[in-house]
Image: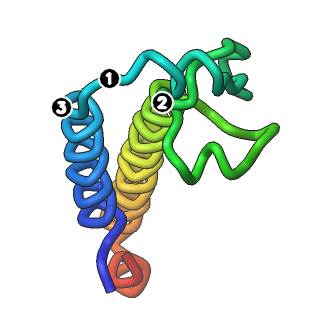
Amino acid sequence: LKCKGCTSDQEEKERLAAAAKAAAKPSNNSNNETDELAICAACKESLPASRFNRNQLSKKDKARCRRCVEQSVQAEEESRKSSQQHKLQEVKQKILEADTKGNMQEKLKY
């Protein structure tokens, strides 16, 4: 089992590697990009299929472009960190309250 932080770090490395691989790939503008267009469900732009990963393209009407997927992942990570900070503050507050009341049992819960 891995924590969310380790998992998100691994996903980030995989995304960066995929982006580097896509950037290094020679561009064939003749047929692939001009014939196959897909509409991103998030930004509603009509983009070449090369701007989507295979997993997203398989979702048809719900496909999101790489940029929108990346933004979503970053927003989710920020939300997770914010939630984690909020929970930590709540626990610290409860410990402080238990400490001021002198209730050791309550303090040990947290």
The answer to which of marks 3 and 2 sits earlier in the sequence is 3
Residue placed under numbered mark 3 in the picture = 24
Q: Is residue 71 left or right of residue 36?
A: left
Residue placed under numbered mark 1 in the picture = 27
Residue that appears at 58% across and 16% down: 34
Task: Tell me the tag on residue 68.
Answer: none
Crowding around mark 3 (Cα neighbors within 10 Å: few <14, some 14 to 19, many 20+) is few
Seen from the viewer's position, the closer of residues 75 and 48 is 48
Cβ atoms under marks 2 and 1 closer than 8 Å: yes
Residue 73 lies, in percent from the top left, at: 45, 40
Q: Secondary structure at mark 3?
A: helix
Residue that appears at 43% across and 79% down: 106
Residue placed under numbered mark 2 in the picture = 50
Residue that appears at 57% across and 53% down: 55
Q: What is the C-alpha distance between the residues marked 2 and 1?
A: 9 Å
Seen from the viewer's position, the closer of residues 68 and 32 is 32
Cβ atoms under marks 3 and 2 closer than 8 Å: no
Give the foreground label among 3 and 1: 1
3 is higher (above) or lower (below) than 94: below
Residue 9 lies, in percent from the top left, at: 23, 55
Mark 2: amino acid: Ser
Seen from the viewer's position, the closer of residues 17 and 74 is 17
66 is higher (above) or lower (below) than 110: above
Q: What is the C-alpha distance between the residues marked 3 and 1?
A: 9 Å
